[in-house]
Amino acid sequence: MAVNFPSIDPAQLHPVAGVTLGWAEAHIRKPNRKDLLVISVDESASVSGVFTLNRFCAAPVTVCREHLANVRAGGKGIRALVINTGNANAGTGEPGMANTRATCDALAKLAGIEPSQVLPFSTGVILEPLPIDRLVAGLPAALANRKADNWYDAAQAIMTTDTLPKAVSRQIDVDGHTITFTGISKGAGMIKPNMATMLGFLAFDANVAQPVLDELVKYVADRSFNCVTIDGDTSTNDSFILIASGQSSLPAITSTDSPAYAALRDAVTEVSQTLSQLIVRDGEGATKFMTIQVEGGKDVAECRQIAYAIGHSPLVKTAFYASDPNLGRILAAIGYAGVTDLDVGKIDLYLDDVLVAKAGGRNPDYQEEDGQRVMKKSEILIRVVLGRGNAEATVWTCDLSHDYVSINADYRS
Amino acid sequence: MAVNFPSIDPAQLHPVAGVTLGWAEAHIRKPNRKDLLVISVDESASVSGVFTLNRFCAAPVTVCREHLANVRAGGKGIRALVINTGNANAGTGEPGMANTRATCDALAKLAGIEPSQVLPFSTGVILEPLPIDRLVAGLPAALANRKADNWYDAAQAIMTTDTLPKAVSRQIDVDGHTITFTGISKGAGMIKPNMATMLGFLAFDANVAQPVLDELVKYVADRSFNCVTIDGDTSTNDSFILIASGQSSLPAITSTDSPAYAALRDAVTEVSQTLSQLIVRDGEGATKFMTIQVEGGKDVAECRQIAYAIGHSPLVKTAFYASDPNLGRILAAIGYAGVTDLDVGKIDLYLDDVLVAKAGGRNPDYQEEDGQRVMKKSEILIRVVLGRGNAEATVWTCDLSHDYVSINADYRS
């Protein structure tokens, strides 16, 4: 039921030099499914990440932050990522932390690295103890089948309620050097600003200095994974990781000023946007993909605030599910978004090219048939023009259907 | 499908001296339904109200604010309320304002009062022109059938997607004088903090000075209509109106210091809580009624913020619909509520009497059967103890079911 989800050919997912991936069926929650993934990176790699702002962040998120801080403080570089599905290891208190550390210890021992060189990730049910014994028992198999061209299997190994594996690959030329970008993502519910049980891992083979990569990951997240919402629930486990494997012949990128940096930045942004949009396209129960573009704001923050109010409104989302141009619900959402000095008399609302509301009221030329025509499409642009400045923001979301309720009423069973 | 909705006996809705109510079938949107209500109050009455904070507030909300401001500035008192359903007259720009003024003018002329003595209310679909001719044509019939014991019919006349009329009546003794309170409310979706297309009208026969009534209405709204949420959508038209008809033999209440004021305040609060809870019990598609109580906060604002994050979470609401004790979703909602310095290691979570999470992690003694037992009930208390202060707040909400999606996907058809 995913919305215009592109067909992904495993053979088109290019290996990224210096990165190998191996999976196992560890029976974390259910038997006979890939639920454990190890990503190994060579010593030449830089790794950076951004994580959920949820105060109830999961144990692995806390440990990732520690281990990345250790690298920034001069410690040894990250050499492995380990991801389990089926259990989020969140709301698990001290035993949860101990289990995450035990995961890193076990992988480090098997791989001959230090525990601080491992980044751990978990996704799945919250508030249940991580079955650490089964996880650790699965690690040798995952390490053993590591391959550079395992990206499609890796995308499968991190799925939870996802109906389709999510992966994207690109190659671009930078100053005569081919740079390869390949990434995977997962997530279908509990998706909202500041990420969700949304995981994204994107590797490329350029050599990027740690401080530059740290800046790049934030820049990119704000334009991709932080712009999607399915149900407004921000997860405890969101993580987006960039790996610059450092194996390309392109000279090292040590500042954000060069044209080469700009080329890499734009490519990483595009790949990340696609990865994050795949999450929305496969949103739980989604039948429509909506782009919400808010323009003419005083600042980006207020544009995002309004875009998210629209994107989170169950009334807006059910109207889109029904293809019912009950568009006053969008105005209501704009009105309660919390921009207290908003002059609604200046607001225009477009649905694709159709001007629905003009200067805060119904456009006299608006015909319900025109709204209906757009609502029936599977990809819809909602454009709000605030008329009070030059800032803008975009959010991607999906509709709210019967299937969303079914999926979330049944998720654990 | 309403949740433990009490049976309402029209004969038990006491008239309030000095208040009469008359309805009409004006065919605002659909034929053969009560959709127009006039409430007349005697000259002795004080009237006050609170309204939606939605920036896209409807034309009648703007006019109500003007007319109440006029009274406070020494203008003539409010003598009539007029309410139409079927059309919210919101997102209608200048023509919407003109239609609201025309409504007040027409009623004032028929009733022999000034337009500024009329408070107008509308509820229904947003962004469509108010059929002012049909509304005005219905006014004589509504005026003609005004009666003091028309409260049940009045409750029917303000329904939109409500499945049941909502009314409550009480009598208490204050200093040897019987005071009668009768109120009606409507609303089933687009319900959230700061009210929703939620209308509440509560009359009582005490004599209360305008400034005291102005203070009372805010006090009560913050403990009743501002504590309910169904879907997190704040409407353009929310209004809660208190009428003190001034016909009781109880001496006039001119300050908030007296025991008589305290008795009235508590009674008005109780009746308003019941009226607002009826809205949740009849929430669109509701199968469960949940009380979310957040305690031990630094201030009431943060307790409300967390209570609303839980109450708005589609994941929490679908889990309750399914009676699935997937309670980590509640922790996730607490974590993303936006209380940035929250120490999750101090948080306890109870479901009724069952301690689910202790000090931020799963309570070792918690058994899933215990959670399951509570989840199967139709009335559930979610209690969160923050452990950082003495403030508390309560919010009432319902679950998110298949029927919610059906109702909102089909509302206009």
Image (tube, coloured by chain):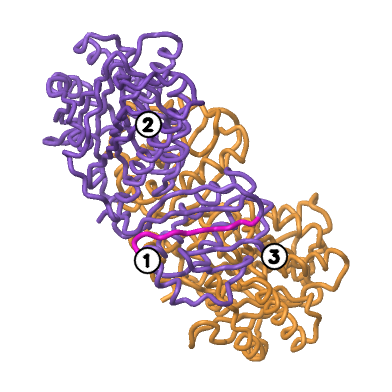
Chain colours: A orange, B purple
Q: Which residue is mark 1?
A: A1
Residues beneath discs 2 and 1 located on the same chain: no
Q: Is residue A293 visible?
A: yes
Where is residue A23, by image quadrant? bottom right
Where is residue B226? Give x, y as percent.
Answer: 45, 40
In depth, the one of B293 and B92 nearer the eye is: B293
Query: Disc 1 residue type?
Result: Met
Residue beneath the point at 60% across and 68% down: B358
**Residue most toward the front?**
B176
Secondary element at image label 1: loop
Q: Residues within 10 Å of mark 2 (few under 14, many from 20)?
A: many
Indicate the amino acid at tag 2: Ser
At horizontal 61% and vertical 66% (from top left) the residue drawn is A237
Badge 3 vs badge 2, beta-carbon distance below 8 Å: no
Give x and y (percent) for residue B387: 64, 57
- Compared with residue B135, is residue A240 higher up or lower down, i.e. above or below? below
Do the dots labelled 3 and 2 sit on one chain?
no
- Residue underneath mark 2: B239
